[in-house]
Amino acid sequence: MSSHRQSHQDSLESKGQGFGSVLLLIVLWLVVLASAIGVVYSTYLSRQLFNEFESLKREENELQVEWGQLLLEKSTWSAQVRVERLAKNKLDMLPPDPAAVTMVKP
């Protein structure tokens, strides 16, 4: 009877080891699956951020062009010749007589 008990006990122990191996395999499989999902999500976010970056670069270029146009417009509006012409034609202003100008020395 002792040998029968021993073989039954060995059988239970081998089943326990098999269960542990299966459990370990399942856990490792779940870890690999989670890692794969993480890689896919990371790739998705990376592509999304890259698209946003490219869109912002295009917007930056458009704003740089607009800024250049505004600087050109500003220089046109503030040109000395234009200011003098507007002062003379719209405000009836004339340059002062040189004899009436007093130079102030520091």
Image (cartoon, helix red, strand yellow):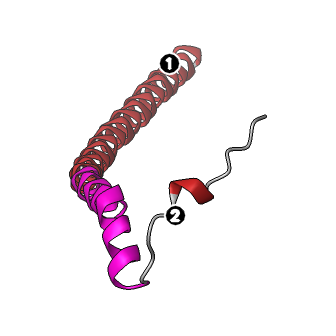
| Closer to us: 55 or 62 | 62
Instruction: Give the vertical position of 87 relative to 40 (above or below).
Output: below
Q: Residue furthest front?
A: 99
Measured in 3D between alpha carbons, the distance from the residue under mark 2 to the one under mark 1, in whole angstroms, is: 119 Å
Q: Where is residue 88 in the image (x, y as percent from the top left)?
A: 37, 76
Q: Where is residue 63 in the image (x, y as percent from the top left)?
A: 28, 56
Instruction: State the SS at label 2.
Output: loop
Instruction: Give the vertical position of 7 relative to 20 (above or below).
Output: above
Is-magenta flag for residue 55?
Answer: no
Q: In this view, does 36 lie to the left or right of 87?
A: left
Tag shown at residue 44: none
Question: What residue is rendered at 68% in x and 51% in y?
Answer: 102
Is-magenta flag for residue 89?
Answer: yes
Our reading of the magenta stretch's main secondary structure is helix
- Quarter holding residue 19: top left
Question: What residue is rendered at 24% in x and 46% in y?
Answer: 47
Residue labelled with disc 1: 10
Mark 2 or mark 1, earlier in chain: 1
Instruction: Find out whether the residues at labels 2 and 1 contact each other: C-beta distance under 8 Å.
Output: no
Instruction: State the SS at label 1.
Output: helix
Q: Say which quadrant the C terminus sits in.
A: top right
Would you call the spot at circle 2 few (<14 residues within 10 Å), some (14-19), or many (20 or more)? Answer: few
Q: Position of residue 49 (x, y in %)?
A: 32, 48
- The residue type indicated by label 2 comes to Pro
| Closer to us: 75 or 97 | 97
Closer to viewer: mark 2 or mark 1:
2
Q: Position of residue 32 (x, y in %)?
A: 34, 33
Would you call the spot at circle 1 few (<14 residues within 10 Å), some (14-19), or many (20 or more)? Answer: few
Residue labelled with disc 2: 96
Q: Is residue 44 left or right of residue 19?
A: left
> Which residues lie in the magenta part?
63-91
| Closer to us: 65 or 35 | 65
